[in-house]
Amino acid sequence: MSRIGVFVCHCGTNIAGTVDVARVAEAMKAEPGVVFATDYKYMCSEPGQQMVKDMIKEHKLDRIVICSCTPRMHENTFRKMLKDTDVNPYMLEIANIREQCSWVHTDKEKATEKAIALARMAVAKVGRDFPLFTSTIPIHKKALVIGGGIAGIQAALDIADAGYQVTLLEREPSIGGRMVMLDKTFPTLDCSACISTPKMVEVSAHPNIELRTSCELEDVSGYVGNFEVTIRQKARYVNHDICTGCGLCETKCPTKVISEFNQGMSERRAIYKSFAQAVPAKPVIDPDHCRKLQEGKCGVCQAVCPLKAINFEDKDTTFTDTYGAIIVSTGYQLIQWQDLYPEYGGGRFKDVISGLQFERLVNASGPTEGHILRPSDQTEPKDVVIVKCVGSRDPKKGKSYCSRACCMYAAKHAHQILEKIPDSNVYVFYMDVRTPGKGYEEFYDRTRKDGANYIRGRVAKIYKEGGRLICRGEDSLLGRQVTVEADLVILETAMVPADGIGEVVHKLGIAMDADGWVQEAHPKLRPVETQTAGVYLAGTCQGPKDIPDTVAQASAAAAKVCGLFSKSEMETSPMTSKVDQSKCCGCGHCEVCCPYKAITLVEIDDREGPKKIRRTVASVNSGLCQGCGCCAAACRTGAIDLLGFTNDQILREVDALCQ
Amino acid sequence: MDRCLNNRENAKALAARIAKDAGVDLQDCYQCGKCSGGCPMAGDMDLMPRQIIQYMRLGLMGDVLRSKSIWLCAACHTCVDRCPHDINLPGLIEGARMEAKRRGMIGVKEVDKFTDIFLENVKMFGKNQEVVLEGLYNVTTGHLMQDMVNVPHMLKHKIVGPELNTTKQAAEVKELMLRAQAAENERKRGEQ
């Protein structure tokens, strides 16, 4: 026979103001199995907890019901309290008579009745509770960072500096991401490459970091502390162990290809380094454009290489490693505005460019060596129009969200034009100016005082007349149509998730939001974690953000990983799913609906009468299971139970309520 | 009609001069509209007080000089009092009104007449004479009966009466006004 103790909390007047707590305690005394019931002012307080412990001893209680606030608030507090007693921490039920009763009702009589009903349900359930025990899993102290932009670089460095091994994965031939393409960073105007390239070099030189460029995620299995990750090394056709990066091959390669790094505004060779400060500072061959690989002719690079580092027979390879934690930092790209905005020329006008193209134009290592020259005729523009919110805040053509960084880099672009071209005029068309950051509003003020003309309204149409681009819009502050004749138009386009994010998300078993950004576990309280334990987020893969926020999030994710690695093993929640294999029919419904890939179908030996047979049944990996209960709901034969919330326990609660 | 924003250097220079005289940095304005929201005259204005600044910023001075608003401003300074940047909007409006008057662009002729008569009055008597102001204003604008219902009240409280409202320093006031006029004439010659 169970010996149940019921403790009803006043929570000051939070509960006692609306619920007659003494009556609830009194009513519980009559419930079967209850040997002790009382009320107390603050159950969670030190004296409150001591009283529970004393009563456990005095009345030899083996199951506890606490009628108080939501279990989200203090379930853990009371579980910890029970660790000091003979009662198993999972022989505890919380009846939520605050959030679900006293706070939402005013009628004391009816609220008390409801509180009694809630308490009775908890008593019924606790009677069917059984002890559960946490288990531990070992943690492999090596982290994988997917994506080598500034977020991945920062996270990798932080983890490596803490003394743990890190593999930094990058699909491009060089790390650096978007930040290294930028000219200057707002609001301090320090040179973007000057502050990011030293970090790139630090990554390549760090003894704890294994840098893997031209690599992609192939497959992930396992769970927190023990992810088995297969990585595909794409063929580079250059042996980086031998190559010294002398660059001779690049100068001799006859094939010219549009440069991705310079946003289509210059050319590179088929054997190339993305940019001068690339890390690793060694070239790769672009197989789609190499004449030797495409047509079997040429091979000049192989002929000139003094170290014989070129290998046209190179193939993709895969390798597998074990990681304790994974950080996703796959970044963003800009929306393809050309397909969406025919009213802005849809890409027909050479002098309508994106913000990232402007970054390359104004950069000293860019195609024009830092001179702002318009792409069509290489002349210096005098009248420049900047259009904000192209693709952002446009649910019909683009995305409904705000891309967050554009207001600031639009101000930076305006400032740079006015600085570099003394008698220029800059017109910024905007809907709102959003400057929520340290020093941001001041930077915007300064840009206006530099002479930038801010015009509230979206440009409705850009057309060509007499060699100039006519931008027509409304100044909605004046309520009038306005036109500006421009030599150059810069579109500050929306950030969207990087190509291929869907595959990464799928392989990791994490969630994506409606716009394709990776979903964090909680928008406020768990912003760098995912719903899958051991997988963390950094930077713009989670949503648009600027460099300071990206770096902050990367360091936060690194801190989470270091926290995980600070222990050699990890306690797991025992409230996971359990399959009764004798009832399981092996239909596989649970495997399909499990969001954490925790269920697999396995073959077992069984007997059917005298006959030995092999049968397919479901099996739960308790390291991966997060206790969501989807499988238990989906199971047709009732073979799956969620420990702590078994079907039997839930039905007892329902019975108690319906009495 | 739409407004082309290119090649507005001259108008922007004029706007900058007016702003400088008023001690205003036009770029300070957030366009929040608190000025317009509190303005007692805004109900009769064609451009909102806020818009006057935006027109000036973009160098659309013609719209400002042609507007009624610059004539209707009562210079009560409610807008300045409430502005988060303490922008002297009545100062800008006064500068714009003076420029408009120089160009013969009289947006509200009653206001112009009233101001002229008032100043003439002060020049002649050293102080404003309500009777003279009222009389001349009503006759020259054709609003013959305007404010006539107030006459008994004003007589009773001796706001108006048979004796002149003068000051001992009338001659000095006149001197002051002549000097101001001479300075304006000098400025005009300089412009030509």
Image: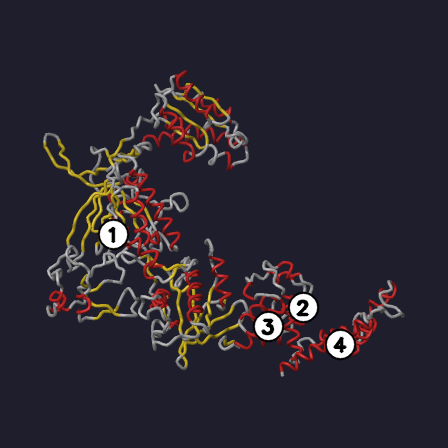
Give the foreground label among 2 and 1: 1
Residue receiving disc 1: A204
* B152 vs A104: above or below: below
**Would you call the spot at circle 4 few (<14 residues within 10 Å), some (14-19), or many (20 or more)?**
few
Residue kind at label 1, given as amino acid type: Ser
In the visual, does A266 lie left or right of A289? right
Q: Quadrant of residue A149?
A: bottom left
Of label 2 and label 3, which has the lower sequence position? 3
- Pinpoint the chain carrying mark 4: B
Residue kind at label 4, given as amino acid type: Leu
- The picture places residue A610, in percent across and down from the top left corner, at 10, 30
In the image, A128 versus B12, the foreground residue is: B12
**Distance between the Cα atoms at labels 2 and 1?**
68 Å
- Pinpoint the chain carrying mark 2: B
Residue at screen point 37% across, 53% down: A543
- Residue that extends furthest to the bottom in the rendered view of this protein: B192
Residue receiving disc 2: B73
In the image, A499 versus B76, the foreground residue is: B76
Residue receiving disc 3: B17
Residues marked 1 and 3 touching at CB (< 8 Å): no
